[in-house]
Image (cartoon, rainbow, N blue to C red):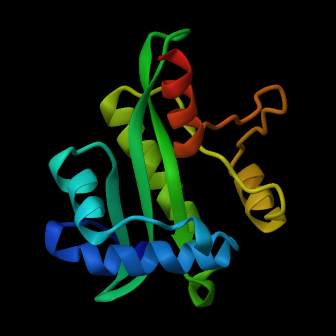
């Protein structure tokens, strides 16, 4: 049950376990080819630049998943928001309330930090996740489309301006 769950912020010595979990989630999402980071780069981003927060989900010493979030900003609202980049619960631990407990934790953080919104994206094929998010009261925003410039696209833009 979720009341046994603890949220443990990752430390620099945890980078190999962080990497393993990220690879595990990427495999689940059929995106393992997208994982290109090195361990030093991962450590630098999480612990030197302090942009994202990586939190292990633990039952005792057992890691059951993780979440990564960071702060964003709504110019329309004039306040900070939380952006949930990853929420991953290992398959054998799903359906036990751990995902919901993550959102309780995020809601507590958002309230404490004055964030009035929590945003995230979901893969279109992941109907189980969509049903779960909607059970929390989350609303799908069909009017907002995700666009992305990848590294090669960014390079092309840089060349184009020169």
Residue 119 pos. (x, y %): 58, 38
Q: Can residue 44 be seen?
A: yes
26 is higher (above) or lower (below) than 113: below
Residue 160 pos. (x, y %): 56, 21
142 is higher (above) or lower (below) than 131: above
The residue lying toward the viewer, choosing from 23 and 75, is: 23
Residue 56 pos. (x, y %): 35, 71
The residue lying toward the viewer, choosing from 54 and 43, is: 43
Residue 148 in which image quadrant: top right
Residue at 78% x, 39% y is 140
Residue 143 in which image quadrant: top right
Residue 96 in which image quadrant: bottom right
Residue 10 pos. (x, y %): 24, 66
Residue at 33% x, 48% y is 52
User: Left of 134 or right of it: where is 67?
Assistant: left
78 is higher (above) or lower (below) than 113: above
Residue at 63% x, 80% y is 94
């Amino acid at each position: 049950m979720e009341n046994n769950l603890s949220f443990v912020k990752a430390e620099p010595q945890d980078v190999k376990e962080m990497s393993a979990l990220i690879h595990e989630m990427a495999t689940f999402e059929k995106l393992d080819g997208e994982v290109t980071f090195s361990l030093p780069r991962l450590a630098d981003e999480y612990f030197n630049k302090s942009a994202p927060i990586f939190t292990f989900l633990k039952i005792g010493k057992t890691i059951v998943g993780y979440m990564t979030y960071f702060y964003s900003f709504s110019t329309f609202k004039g306040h900070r928001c939380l952006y949930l980049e990853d929420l991953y619960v290992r398959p054998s631990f799903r359906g036990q309330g751990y995902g919901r407990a993550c959102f309780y934790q995020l809601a507590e953080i958002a309230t404490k930090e004055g964030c009035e919104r929590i945003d995230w994206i979901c893969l279109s094929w992941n109907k189980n996740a969509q049903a779960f998010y909607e059970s929390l009261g989350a609303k799908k925003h069909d009017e907002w489309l995700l666009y992305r410039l990848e590294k090669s696209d960014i390079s092309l833009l840089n060349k184009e301006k020169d």
